[in-house]
Amino acid sequence: MKFIHVTDPHLVAPGELVLSLDPLPRFEACIRSINDRESDAELVVITGDLVDRGQLSAYHALRTVLDTLVLPYHLLIGNHDDRNNFLSVFGEAWRDESGFIQGTVETKQGLFVFLDTVQQGKSAGEYCARRCRWLQGVLAKSVSQPIYLFMHHPPFDIQIPFLDNIGLESKEAFVDCIDAHDIRHIFFGHVHRPISGSWRGIPFSTLTSTNHQVALNMRKITHDRYSDEAPTYSVVLLDSVSTIVHTFPYMHNKPLSI
Ligand SMILES: [Fe+2]
């Protein structure tokens, strides 16, 4: 199966900018490119920071753009999102029994599990005991199938201090929560960089935002945090033996003449 991973559009109210960039046309270009090139995919997942300042008008702008997408989509929230404003525009979103925006989708290749790692009002994430109980219930009912996890905050440090300072808190509790299950891959957002590898034997991948990027800066300094690297989306191909992630810079891909 094929699906598309998009992350961190950071939309704002019309006329506002984020780091001197207008997130809306960049996100519109992303959705146009997916419609033009990847309409045979099964779904699109956006892993949080849907908007930058939690504004209702930004969620309305998001909905307007997503109404043009020819594929089904699933939305996670990130630390820049506002749960109530999000739900007032996307009332159909999943909620678990505690009200967290978590849910699952059955696919041919296994179960996609969408997590809510947001602590409202804080940049750092958390995966609390109530959320963990929900996830353990999902995993307990799915022992015979591969699991693909989607979350905003990565469950480990990525060695960029600026981002690790606002990472997931209580990482050990999250490890206990997923331990001993067949997690095939973790897809996350939050870091605004193209990163892949494995963690505790679990492969992972993430990608750049459709708006601004975080600079590859592993020093503990506070300037040069952001960069103008290209926005991307990922085309993910899954079958029973492989996970292939192609990341596409949809605004910077002119063919070269031979
Ligand atoms: Fe973000």
Image (tube, grey):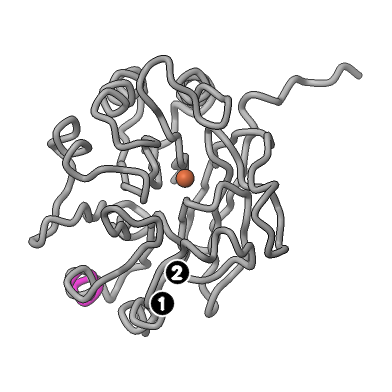
Report x, y in % for residue 207.
57, 47
Q: Residue furthest right?
A: 258
Magenta span: 135-141
- Residue 230 lies in what quarter of the image? top right
Q: Residue 242 vs residue 45: left or right? A: right
Can the viewer see residue 25 in this picture? yes
Does the residue at mark 1 contact the one at mark 2 (Cβ under 8 Å)? yes
Residue found at x 40% / y 56%: 123
- Please state which amino acid type lies under the numbered disc 1: Lys
Foreground of the two, 24 or 185? 24
Residue found at x 62% / y 65%: 197
Secondary structure, mark 2, is loop
Foreground of the two, 246 or 238? 246
Q: Which residue is mark 1?
A: 171
Mark number for residue 155?
Answer: 2
Residue found at x 58% / y 43%: 208
Question: In the picture shown, does residue 149 fall above or below 215?
Answer: below
Q: Residue furthest front?
A: 222
Q: Residue 213 vs residue 153: left or right? A: right
Q: Residues within 10 Å of mark 1 (few under 14, many from 20)?
A: some
Q: Residues within 10 Å of mark 2 (few under 14, many from 20)?
A: many
- Residue 48 lies in what quarter of the image? top left
Can the viewer see residue 115 in this picture? no
- Residue 148 lies in what quarter of the image? bottom left
Q: Is 106 contained in the magenta span? A: no
